[in-house]
Amino acid sequence: MKFNIAVIPGDGIGPEVVEQAKKALDAVAEAYDHIFLYKEAQLGASAMSIDGNPLPKKTIEICKNADAILFGAVGNAKYDNDPSAKVRPEQGLLKLRQELDLFCKIKPVKAYDNLIYNSPLKREVIKGTDFIIFRELTGGIYFGEKKISDDEKSAYDASVYTVDEISRVTHLAFKAAKNRKKKVTLVDKANVLETSRLWRRTVIEIAKEYSDVEVEFMFVDNAAMKLILDPKQFDVILTENLFGDIISDEASVISGSIGLLASSSIGKNNALFEPIHGSYPLAKGKNIANPLASILSAAMLLEHLGLEEEADAIERAVEKSIALGITTKDIKRKTQKSTTTSKVGDFIAD
Amino acid sequence: MKFNIAVIPGDGIGPEVVEQAKKALDAVAEAYDHIFLYKEAQLGASAMSIDGNPLPKKTIEICKNADAILFGAVGNAKYDNDPSAKVRPEQGLLKLRQELDLFCKIKPVKAYDNLIYNSPLKREVIKGTDFIIFRELTGGIYFGEKKISDDEKSAYDASVYTVDEISRVTHLAFKAAKNRKKKVTLVDKANVLETSRLWRRTVIEIAKEYSDVEVEFMFVDNAAMKLILDPKQFDVILTENLFGDIISDEASVISGSIGLLASSSIGKNNALFEPIHGSYPLAKGKNIANPLASILSAAMLLEHLGLEEEADAIERAVEKSIALGITTKDIKRKTQKSTTTSKVGDFIAD
Ligand SMILES: CC(C)[C@H](C(=O)O)[C@@H](O)C(=O)O
Ligand SMILES: CC(C)[C@H](C(=O)O)[C@@H](O)C(=O)O
């Protein structure tokens, strides 16, 4: 079969890890007789360096016309440390989410047996952990009105949620739970926030349509604790945009390496796949970045295209590379020699 | 010396742990020849059960006239699971913070050698951890405007910060850092939020007055990860209200037990001391709740009153109870028998 894939390398280590993911896709294309037509697009600081725009019109167009989007990373320290910068790389990604209405970011979190030793958490705490986070991605304080007063002495961010925004991601989460351990945990701050109370009300209503799924409510402060104390209790975590951002990154420590976690951002007509690690500028161009998360996002992309077997093949290759220790420095065991980004990519493609 | 202490037992396990803290204070009074005049006040669900008001006027008055406030806990599941409740116990605490202008919540986080085994984190990750969180407590999304639309289909919370609000807590954090390892980490989300950018700008300015203190900026998602991956890197963490709520609870896992962490909430003229654990309704009245966090908040209270030696005496007694294993179930070793809330209190007082 033939597919159009938009490829956005982005910033920092984005380009080098995406290249390895493309190698894996090429290998799949050859082995399974598919054609993947890549269209490369710019976003973030790398796009800004051309004409100042973190999300060029052409990128939106390429993405809208693609069957799926493979994304690297965004962000550049230059802008982070300049709080008065008016345009920042991240706006490219946020605007793309909005333009394509990618309303849900899905992050599976698993403790890989072969990597448990690498986690800061004790083996007995994380062994067997297997949950998925459904994070709402186009609402909340990310996209509410922002203001700075004329004298620059006061700033303002608004968080807004509507029942419709909450409903669509809630249905996705409950549907996923039906095929899993049948439990949804809504993470909110309903003892303080009005938006959280709307989330709770809406989720309580929708839960009635999924009578075989148990629903549980947890304050975000408590959840941040429970994720570390007892991560095995979770099956599907459902939450709003900002809380999802925080707890997804926190949960990544469970896997033993952030270099292994992939995510998908889903809309009605589009889907974007990316590693959850960021642009990690310090490692840029050094051929040391771990490409596995990007390669696993390519596997998620294949699954999304209905190519289950092909996705499996990539996942097996990743597991093999970990088992054999053909990995970058960040996840190698003390007794193993590490290898480079591109060699890991070659091994997986092979 | 003679001191007026406002005592707010609050909800859930609040009353039983506060009672043990009072025992410790009484023992100090006797040994060091002080007089502590306690005035008990109501707050939260327990206050609501009298006249529906989570913060009676009388409580505010008692607190305003006290030299320090000893607080238990607030919260009751009945209200959490009723997203349409108009008045909730937590409003009592939030309003008290506002009335007394308690603008900074300070939480020390330490890995106690004797309790490291109890933490979900590996010994080598946490050993030696010693940092303090300075959380802004009267601004941000907690106290911004809240709205629900007439058709109840859309909700809104505003987060607002002013330079003045940011400045006062920032100065406290930098002053503390001067007497410690001389590093302040500002946790924010400046790549997305306007309020965070105001925080960054303000902190950059103030940092110039503390040239011997290093300042570092970290996005909250990254911080949630780093707190678990490498908590030893932190000295003083400075952050806004909501992020502070989340990462303080997260950081509590490091200590090996949330039953051990105390906090102070500081204003210009008042100070409140409380355990960081909540009301834990399931344990209420069972004499199993760990009173050490409440007892340690009494020690913080003494320190605040200038009674350093007296505070030390309590801290030593707590360390002894842990070393001897005279503790409640939550922190006992497998080989030890646990004891009750009140017996731990008696031991400390002895
Ligand atoms: C880059 C940044 C704006 C983004 C976010 O906060 O959503 C990232 O942290 C993520 O989680 O995808
Ligand atoms: C009880 C609740 C409103 C409170 C908060 O969120 O501030 C608590 O979690 C805390 O951290 O003191």
Image (cartoon, coloured by chain):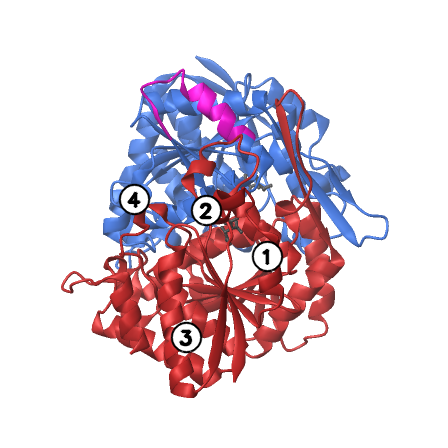
Chain colours: A blue, B red
Residue B58: mark in rendering: 1
Q: Amino acid at mark 1?
A: Lys
Residue tagged 2 = B75
Residue A44: tell me if it is visible.
no
Q: Secondary structure at mark 1?
A: helix
Q: Amino acid at mark 2?
A: Gly
Q: Taking A130 as reference, is B317 above or below it?
A: below
Tell me the CA gap for discs 3 and 1: 24 Å
Q: Position of residue B286 (x, y in %)?
A: 27, 52
Q: Which residues are magenta?
A: A198-215
Asked if the residue under mark 4 is in contact with the one under mark 1, i.e. CB atoms within 8 Å, the reply is no
Tell me the CA gap for discs 2 and 3: 25 Å
Q: Residue at x 69, y 42 (%)?
A: A157
- Disc 3 or 1, which lies upstream in sequence? 3
The chain ID associated with circle 3 is: B
Tell me, yes or no, whether dots 3 and 4 are on the same chain.
no
Between disc 1 and disc 4, the foreground one is 1
- Identify the image quadrant of residue B165: bottom right
Between disc 4 and disc 2, the foreground one is 2
Write down which quadrant ligand 1 falls in. top right
- Identify the image quadrant of residue A34: top left
Residue tagged 4 = A322
Asked if the residue under mark 4 is in contact with the one under mark 3, i.e. CB atoms within 8 Å, the reply is no
Q: Position of residue A199 (x, y in %)?
A: 52, 29
Q: Amino acid at mark 4?
A: Ile
